[in-house]
Image (cartoon, coloured by chain):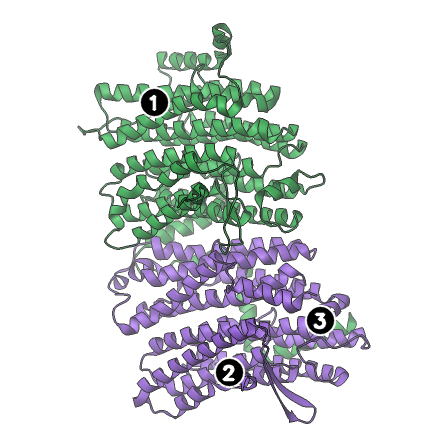
């Protein structure tokens, strides 16, 4: 008997869901932490075994859609699966003894299922299911420690996630209708590429995916939510889950047709995030917040490039491989950096020095130091960004350099003598090594070019000036004892928060009241006129007979006159 | 023999109704057993008819009860959809009611009228003419009144009075409409729309408004929705029933019949009546959701949610298009299973822990995890989160709106989704994430047969909510039925 390798695709999703169900069993629940690394294994198998670009139709489920693995999908899936695996190993040690380990495991599995499913969906319905699963199931991970700051971050997160979901659903409906009622993603993208397609669909999708991927100014949730989660969850949030938004853009944007206005707007939002988030993040005190801003910045770069390519009407083949490779490198590297925060907090002396050195290597790669994997993926992506975009990407090494330098200086110190657990070190090292090596081995296959045909060291050195400048600035700052200012995390959120301060205050009151019987006066926050509505309805009901007769007569008169 | 089946199906609940009325309270066990057995028998008969109908056998039973007035019971595909839903939910609601009331007072009366209600609802579904429809529709009003005032306190009596005023006024308007129409074109059977071409537009428009206005009262269309939130004074099983299959559904079902079987979609489009009705339904959707956000009483919040959700059905029916009618029919079923889940959970929370207000919910998830899990699934379904049933409804309604050149429907659905999230997610947040108060901690959710009977019905309908969405294209799913109905009769 032979089993079709494409049957691996549903297993990729069903296996973690099965593990999630096992978490519900009372006896098994807390022990399911041990199963965390097992969850992404079918995905790893699918990366090697599943056929490419073949849709496996799934009937009877949802709206009769299917699953398939595209070429960019393979890169996203492999990056995510590797990260989920190592983060899972890390989590089983890091979360050991946690009172909410069961809840953590349950939602970890669910988010994982949704995250990997997004990369496999061939139709709108299943894509939307997986995307919603990622969005909603990640909420319990964000608020895992239940601290007030985390709860606030969770509130911001869930509000934006729900808005994003709604925008996406509206976009999907309009897109599906424009494509003649189909639910196949490929057909919808093709119909978007046709002339006279409705830009509204594009904007709704950019908004929906942009929220997930941290597109400025929809990113406000990200710098507060990612650091709020436990370390391994932060790693997958920042490394793998934001990629669901990027992959959405990769999958749905109508490559090959020029969208000057929409593309330029996306490019502007993306590139402004690239610089603004890096600079703002460089003034943060919490290493995880710094990293979250780095994610906003790096995703801004990706979305900026995609916007520029969309404006120019570049074909899928010329844009997507580079984007996927870049996303792969970022996901692994960002995962390693996040895990490093937890490792550094337990290391002392020489070991700590080694850990910081390793993290610095990864950080330099993300910033684009020549001859690193990061520089390689950057050079690949510059081709799609246009001249201006390529210049911006080159300059961004300066801001990224400052940001990541800041990260290294904010790393926590071990407070007491503590054994450094191998199960935490190995995942960090493994992710760092993969991040630094994998792009080299994939580069030729993905882009069709050899990495650095001839190495011109002089040119490389010259092109590295922004990063050099960053180094000079950091050293100078250290030399004169300058300290970076510490700004509150969440940037734009401040003004938003003032705007709905009352709502947040009500939520806070509700949270702090807890078990006491004191009623929470949420009703007080409603404006006067809403109470009027309540009174009006009561008045009508108090005089039900006459009111109903009146309404009927009024309607009759209206109809007769109309 | 088979032509008597419709008659049997409709009047089957008369047996447990009469027995319930007659049995004294000390024989309550027998009453419970008989009620459950008949609910099971009914489900079996419906199952048999479903299989027969898939082979194309449409049975009907007719009897001329007045000269020129035929009493017709027909089992067409849409009737079957409604009956299947009601037979399934009736079994669930019967089990739940028995557990909910335990050995309380006045239960003979309760179960008697409860069964008359199922009789009326089945009759509404199977009526073959407007007059037959009206008879059962009225019976439904009268049979539900004793249920609404079951508690007998002042609040219930007020709710009952308001309910009667609204529904009787609505019935009067509806009756006037159908009699007027009958005087123009004779008996209207729900097989093919009559020829209305010779009738002045004004007259047709007025009749349409009378009928829809009358039916709209039960379907809680604004501005006729006022009775529904008041009727929250009734016990939870009654609310569950009223909101899921009986009263509001009878109104919505009647509106579908009016548009598709009495007037016919061509006439409705030609008269330009669909769009105003769709706009009214859209306004009801938003208004109901908006009012739900403002409520602090859980059942009242659910009631306004029903106001909103039932209008999804009317919206889909009045948009007139393939996707829209599929959305309407499928939501007829989906709304039923989701809302009955929510109400049964709300009742269980009240029954076990005295939780009535939103603020009491803190930590309820830890005390009653199964109940709150079912509630959560129902709530997510209402928001339209995939893969629940609500997503499937919303998807078809949205595409239906676009197909009928009414893109504003997308905005209505999106707005309603956001409002739904706004009034359901805080409940889930409280129940799952806030610490429970001391009195909640001691509840053992599933101890004892009574408690299991109280909780498990909601768990079953919650699973059905998931299954109806996740396996929407399965041959016997609500969506497949809705498509079958749409293809077989409603889309020419």
Q: Residue furthest front?
A: A1
Which is nearer the eye, B119 or A523? B119
Pinpoint residue A181: horizontal percent, then vertical percent: 63, 51
Hue of chain B? Answer: purple
Whether the residues at callouts 1 and 2 have beta carbons within 8 Å, the answer is no
Kindly report the distance in space between the C-alpha atoms of the residues bearing marks 1 and 2. Answer: 74 Å
Q: Residue B38 or B360: which is nearer the viewer? A: B38
Dot 2 crowding, Cα within 10 Å, few <14, some 14–19, many 20+: many
**From the viewer's perspective, is the residue at label 3 or at label 2 nearer?**
2
Q: Which shade of the palette goes to chain A?
A: green
Q: Which residue reaches farthest left? A: A417
Relative height, residue B259 to residue A457 (above, below): below
Which comes before the other along the chain, label 3 or label 2? 2
**Residue assigned mark 1:** A359
Question: Few, some or many C-alpha atoms within 10 Å of disc 1 (few <14, some 14-19, many ≥20)?
Answer: many
Q: Any mark on residue B264, and which?
A: 3
User: Disc 3 versus disc 2: distance between alpha carbons?
Assistant: 28 Å
Query: What secondary structure is marked by label 3?
Result: loop
Q: Quick check: B488 left or right of A288?
A: right
- Secondary element type, mark 2: helix
Location of mark 2 (residue): B9
Q: Quadrant of the C terminus of chain B?
A: bottom right
Residue B464 falls left or right of residue B104: right
């Amino acid at each position: 008997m032979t089993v079709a390798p494409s049957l691996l695709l549903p297993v990729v999703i069903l296996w973690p869901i099965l593990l999630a169900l096992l978490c519900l069993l009372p006896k098994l629940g807390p022990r399911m932490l041990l199963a965390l690394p097992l969850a992404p294994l079918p995905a790893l198998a699918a990366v090697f075994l599943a056929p490419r670009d073949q849709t496996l139709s799934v009937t009877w489920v949802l709206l009769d859609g299917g699953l398939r693995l595209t070429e960019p999908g393979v890169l996203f899936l492999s990056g995510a699966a590797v990260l989920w695996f190592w983060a899972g190993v890390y989590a089983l040690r890091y979360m050991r003894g946690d009172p909410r380990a069961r809840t953590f495991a349950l939602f970890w599995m669910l988010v994982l299922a949704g995250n990997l499913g997004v990369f496999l969906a061939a139709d709108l319905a299943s894509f939307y299911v997986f995307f919603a699963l990622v969005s909603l199931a990640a909420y319990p991970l964000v608020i895992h420690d239940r601290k007030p700051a985390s709860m606030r971050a969770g509130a911001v997160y869930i509000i934006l996630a729900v808005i994003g979901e709604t925008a996406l659903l509206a976009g999907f409906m309009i897109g599906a209708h424009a494509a003649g009622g189909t639910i196949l993603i490929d057909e919808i993208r093709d119909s978007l590429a046709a002339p006279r397609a409705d830009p509204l669909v594009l904007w709704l999708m950019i908004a929906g995916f942009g929220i997930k991927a941290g597109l400025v100014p929809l990113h406000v949730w990200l710098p507060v939510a990612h650091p709020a989660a436990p370390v391994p969850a932060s790693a997958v949030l920042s490394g793998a889950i934001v990629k669901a938004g990027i992959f959405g853009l990769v999958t749905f944007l109508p490559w090959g047709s020029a969208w000057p206005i929409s593309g330029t707007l996306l490019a502007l939002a993306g590139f402004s995030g690239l610089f603004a988030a890096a600079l703002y993040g460089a003034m943060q005190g919490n290493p995880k917040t710094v990293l979250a801003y780095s994610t906003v910045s790096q995703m801004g770069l990706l979305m900026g490039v995609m916007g520029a390519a969309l404006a120019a009407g570049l074909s899928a083949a010329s844009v997507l491989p580079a984007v996927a490779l870049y996303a792969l490198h970022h996901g692994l590297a960002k995962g390693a950096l996040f895990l490093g925060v937890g490792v550094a907090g337990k290391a002392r002396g020489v070991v700590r020095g080694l850990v910081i050195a390793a993290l610095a290597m990864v950080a330099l790669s993300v910033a684009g130091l020549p001859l690193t994997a990061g520089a390689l993926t950057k050079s690949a992506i510059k081709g799609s960004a246009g001249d201006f975009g390529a210049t911006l990407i080159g300059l961004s090494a300066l801001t990224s350099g400052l940001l990541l330098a800041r990260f290294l200086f904010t790393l926590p110190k071990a407070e007491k003598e503590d054994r450094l657990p191998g199960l935490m070190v190995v995942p960090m090292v493994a992710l760092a090594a993969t991040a630094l090596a994998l792009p080299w081995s994939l580069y030729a296959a993905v882009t069709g070019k050899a990495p650095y045909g001839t190495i011109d060291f002089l040119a490389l050195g010259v092109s590295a000036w922004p990063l050099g400048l960053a180094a000079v600035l950091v050293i100078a700052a250290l030399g004169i004892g300058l300290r970076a200012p510490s700004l509150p995390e969440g940037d734009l959120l401040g003004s938003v928060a003032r705007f709905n301060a009352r709502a947040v205050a009500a939520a806070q009151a509700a949270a702090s009241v807890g078990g006491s019987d004191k009623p929470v006066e949420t009703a007080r926050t409603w404006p006067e006129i809403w109470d009027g509505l309540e009174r009006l309805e009561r008045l009508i009901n108090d005089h039900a007979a006459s009111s109903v007769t009146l309404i009927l007569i009024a309607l009759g008169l209206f109809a007769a006159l109309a | 023999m088979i032509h008597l089946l419709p008659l049997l199906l409709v009047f089957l609940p008369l047996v447990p109704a009469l027995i319930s009325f007659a049995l004294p309270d000390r024989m309550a066990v027998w009453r419970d057993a008989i009620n459950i057995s008949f609910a099971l028998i009914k489900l079996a008969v419906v199952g048999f008819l479903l299989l027969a109908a898939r082979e194309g056998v449409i049975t009907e039973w007719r009897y001329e009860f007045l000269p020129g007035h035929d009493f017709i019971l027909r089992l067409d595909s849409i009737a079957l959809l409604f009956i299947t839903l009601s037979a399934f939910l009736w079994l669930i609601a019967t089990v739940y009611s028995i557990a909910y009331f335990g050995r309380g007072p006045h239960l003979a009366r309760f179960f008697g009228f409860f069964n008359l209600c199922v009789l009326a609802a089945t009759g509404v579904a199977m009526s073959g003419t407007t007059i037959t429809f009206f008879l059962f529709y009225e019976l439904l009003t009268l049979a539900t009144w004793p249920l609404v005032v079951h508690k007998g306190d002042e609040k219930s009596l007020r709710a009952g009075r308001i309910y009667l005023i609204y529904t009787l006024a609505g019935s009067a308007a509806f009756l006037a409409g159908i009699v007027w129409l009958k005087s123009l074109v004779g008996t209207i059977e729900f097989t093919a729309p009559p020829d209305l071409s010779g009738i002045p537009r004004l007259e047709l428009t007025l009749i349409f408004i009378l009928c829809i206005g009358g039916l709209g009262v039960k379907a809680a269309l604004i501005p006729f929705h006022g009775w529904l939130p008041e009727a929250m004074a009734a016990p939870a099983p009654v609310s569950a029933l009223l909101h899921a299959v009986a009263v509001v559904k009878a109104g919505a079902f009647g509106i579908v019949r009016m548009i598709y079987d009495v007037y016919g979609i061509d006439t409705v489009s030609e008269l330009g009546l669909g769009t105003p009705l769709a706009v009214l339904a859209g306004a009801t959707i938003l208004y109901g959701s908006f009012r739900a956000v403002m409520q602090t009483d859980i059942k009242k919040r659910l009631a306004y949610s029903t106001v909103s959700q039932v209008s999804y059905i009317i919206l889909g029916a009045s948009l007139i298009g393939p996707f829209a009618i599929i959305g309407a029919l499928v939501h007829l079923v989906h709304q039923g299973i989701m809302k009955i889940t929510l109400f049964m959970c709300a009742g269980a929370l009240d029954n076990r822990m005295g939780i009535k207000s939103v603020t009491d919910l803190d930590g309820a998830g830890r005390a009653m995890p199964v109940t709150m899990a079912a509630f959560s699934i129902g709530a997510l379904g209402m928001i339209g989160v995939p893969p629940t049933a609500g997503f499937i409804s919303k998807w078809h309604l949205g595409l239906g709106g676009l197909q009928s050149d009414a893109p504003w429907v997308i905005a209505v659905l999106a707005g309603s989704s956001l409002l739904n999230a706004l009034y359901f997610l805080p409940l889930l947040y409280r129940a799952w994430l806030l610490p429970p108060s001391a009195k909640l901690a001691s509840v053992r959710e599933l101890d004892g047969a009574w408690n299991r009977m109280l909780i498990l019905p909601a768990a079953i309908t919650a699973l059905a909510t998931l299954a109806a969405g996740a396996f929407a294209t399965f041959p016997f799913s609500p969506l497949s039925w809705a498509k079958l109905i749409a293809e077989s009769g409603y889309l020419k």
